[in-house]
Amino acid sequence: RLFFIAVKPDGGIQLKSVIRPVKYTDAPLTSTLEALLAGPTPAEVNQGLMSLVAPEARLRRAQVKDGTAYLDFSEAFRFNSLGKEGLSAQLRQVVYSATEFSTVKRVQILLEGKTADYLGPEGLYIGKPLSRESF
């Protein structure tokens, strides 16, 4: 299950899930998140879905330890042209998609291999692991 964004008639942002087959060899979480970063398929776009993760963002590494997924993204993940609301939606897409796995309860975002306290110039806090309840 991947989570994308739909814009409501009033302009608000809503999380929507899609079930899509994801092929993997030995890293299902990594393959799933790479599918999320690739964005919605043309059919999903026709359903009004989009991704708010920067198209340049890359997943460098994913590791799960004690219920926390440590997801290391490239620097491009730090920015979103829609500001704080866009960053929050982007984080929800990643956290909700990762926590679909029973072994993942929380997600710690890393940028270029390091823990960061904030995303974007508006300062959305990511210094501790995030769960679905964080939103």
Image (spheres, helix red, strand yellow):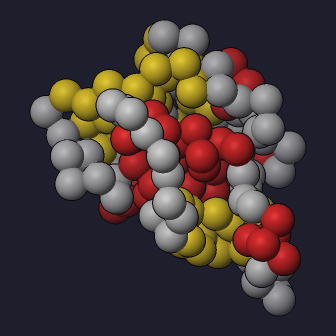
Q: Write the residue at 65% across / 42% down.
A: 37
Relative horizontal placement of residue 114, taking residue 13 as reference (left or right): left
User: Which of the pair 22/65 is nearer the observer?
Assistant: 22
Q: Write the residue at 60% across / 49% down.
A: 36
Relative horizontal placement of residue 58, taking residue 133 as reference (left or right): right
| Quadrant of the image occupied by residue 54 | top right
Can residue 118 be seen in the rendering of this structure?
yes
Does 39 appear above or below 4?
above
User: Which of the pair 95/17 is nearer the observer?
Assistant: 17
User: Which of the pair 94/121 is nearer the observer?
Assistant: 94
Residue 39 is situated, as x and y percent measured from the top left of the image, at 72, 51
Does 51 appear above or below 11?
above
How many marks do you count on the picture? 0
User: Can you say which quadrant of the picture contains the C terminus?
Assistant: bottom left
Does 47 appear above or below 122?
below
Q: Write the residue at 71% across / 38% down.
A: 122
User: Which residue sits furthest top?
Assistant: 113
